[in-house]
């Protein structure tokens, strides 16, 4: 074998090593003296016509390593490496999983990983929300419930361990459970009825999604993406203000026995009250006690009244008394994803003053 053949053989070996990362071979690099046809199955081009045809060794190298016959031309090898990248990175082309939110649906607290609130109170538009990597270990089934309300009390089912790992908390089950972590890749797109849209992204540290969009419409479609999941909703209108809201707190703030909230029901359609919106309230335990103990109530806005039984109020009225948070006129939607349930609310806030009614 002459010096030119040796040089070409060395170069073909170098090319074979360089292309090895792509999981491909460069062809047969043996030095057999049998003249062979070019291997077209690997995509090689025809032999370089500058090779000395009278030298069998040169011809063989040219046939099986045609991409490297010109030592000065490296563009062919670069092209091969570039075009092999997509097949090596299947995650880059993976389509996200899209789920449609169901209008009127809500998440069970034990399944909820995300909550997005689109608040149209007082003529402005504000968004607040967050998505976590897992449901909260603090929530289970309600301790008390009736047709309108549920009382959730954080009392672990078993004694909590003395210590949990740094990334764990003692959950409602009494066992150490992984703590929720906020997802910082969440992205929220709002589109109004004029097709204008705005995008809000989660805070890089806290995962909070917040802002005051300048969209003019009050009918908004939602697209929320996070962790390979996409939740989309149909356009839903933020409810209008309720009229003539008022309330009576029997027993007073220190020892409440009953709460009644009244409002003027939304306009009727052919004499039938509207039922596509709800009146909702979340009443937490006094902030001096803290913790995930609270009462939530929801009724159809067309009813015009909400009643909260004292058994779901008295446990909250500790230290300095009951901390009523007002009500919301709201439309709900929810979607079950691979990570958990996401709830979206289109709402306005109302703050009815409460009249205390105490009896001797």
Image (cartoon, rainbow, N blue to C red):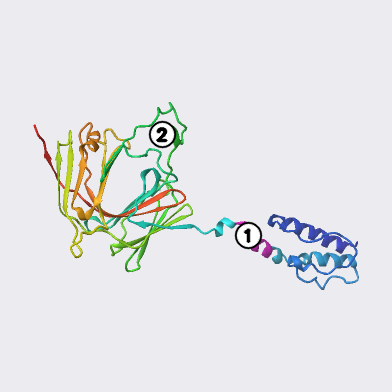
Looking at the image, residue 314 lies above or below residue 71: above
Instruction: Give the x, y percent position of residue 71.
Output: 77, 65
| Quarter residue 320 falls in | top left
Numbered disc in front, either 2 or 1? 2
Look at the image and say whether residue 83 sits in the magenta stretch.
Answer: yes
Q: Quadrant of the C terminus?
A: top left
Task: Say which residue appears at 44% left-offset and 32% top-offset.
Answer: 175
Looking at the image, residue 217 lies above or below residue 340: below
| Quarter residue 53 falls in | bottom right
Instruction: Give the x, y percent position of residue 339.
Output: 45, 48
The residue tagged with tag 1: helix, strand or loop?
A: helix
Instruction: Give the x, y percent position of residue 195.
Output: 35, 68
Q: Quadrant of the N terminus?
A: bottom right
Instruction: Give the x, y percent position of residue 258.
Output: 18, 39
Look at the image and say whether residue 30 sits in the magenta stretch.
Answer: no
Looking at the image, residue 351 lies above or below residue 4: above
Residue pointed to by mark 2: 173
Q: Which residues are magenta?
A: 78-89
Q: Residues within 10 Å of mark 2 (few under 14, many from 20)?
A: some
Nearer to the camera, 237 or 192? 237
The secondary structure making up most of the magenta span is helix
Looking at the image, residue 268 lies above or below residue 108: below
Q: Sequence order check: which comes first, mark 2 or mark 1? A: 1
Mark 2 → mark 1, Cα distance in angstroms? 45 Å
Q: Residues within 10 Å of mark 1 (few under 14, many from 20)?
A: few
Q: Which mark is residue 87?
A: 1
Q: Are the residues at dot 2 and dot 1 in contact (C-beta closer than 8 Å)?
A: no
Left or right? Give the position of 216 relative to 355: right
Left or right? Give the position of 163 relative to 69: left
In the picture as drawn, the residue positioned furthest to the left comes out as 360
The residue tagged with tag 2: helix, strand or loop?
A: loop
Task: Say which residue appears at 44% left-offset and 44% top-offset.
Answer: 134
């Amino acid at each position: 074998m002459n010096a030119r053949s040796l040089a070409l053989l060395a170069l073909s070996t170098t090319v074979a090593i360089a292309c090895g990362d792509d999981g491909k071979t460069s062809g047969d690099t043996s030095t057999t003296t049998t003249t062979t046809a070019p291997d077209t199955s690997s995509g090689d081009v025809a032999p370089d016509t500058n090779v000395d045809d009278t030298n069998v060794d040169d011809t063989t190298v040219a046939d099986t390593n045609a991409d490297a016959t010109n030592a000065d031309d490296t563009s062919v090898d670069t092209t091969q490496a570039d075009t092999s990248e997509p097949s090596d990175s299947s995650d880059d082309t993976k389509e996200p999983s899209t789920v449609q939110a169901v209008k009127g649906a809500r998440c069970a607290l034990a399944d909820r990983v995300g909550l997005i609130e689109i608040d149209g109170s007082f003529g402005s538009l504000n968004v607040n929300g967050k998505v976590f990597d897992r449901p909260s270990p603090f929530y289970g089934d309600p301790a008390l419930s009736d047709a309108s309300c549920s009382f959730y009390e954080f009392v672990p089912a078993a004694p909590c361990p003395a210590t949990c790992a740094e990334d764990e908390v003692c959950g409602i089950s009494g066992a150490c459970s992984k703590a929720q972590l906020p997802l910082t890749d969440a992205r929220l797109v709002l589109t109004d009825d004029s097709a204008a849209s705005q995008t809000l992204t989660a805070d890089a540290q806290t995962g909070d999604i917040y802002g005051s969009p300048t969209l003019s419409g009050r009918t908004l479609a939602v697209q929320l993406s996070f962790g390979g999941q996409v939740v989309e909703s149909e356009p839903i209108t933020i409810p209008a203000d309720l009229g003539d809201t008022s309330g009576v707190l029997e027993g007073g703030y220190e020892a409440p026995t009953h709460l009644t909230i009244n409002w003027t029901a939304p306009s009727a359609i052919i004499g039938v009250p509207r039922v596509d919106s709800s009146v909702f309230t979340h009443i937490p335990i006094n902030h001096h006690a803290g913790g995930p103990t609270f009462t939530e109530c929801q009724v159809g806005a067309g009813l015009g009244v909400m009643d909260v039984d004292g058994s779901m109020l008295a446990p909250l009225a500790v230290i300095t008394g009951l901390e009523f948070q007002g009500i919301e006129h709201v439309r709900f939607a929810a979607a079950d994803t691979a990570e958990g349930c996401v709830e979206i609310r289109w709402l306005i806030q109302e703050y009815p003053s409460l009249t205390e009614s105490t009896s001797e």
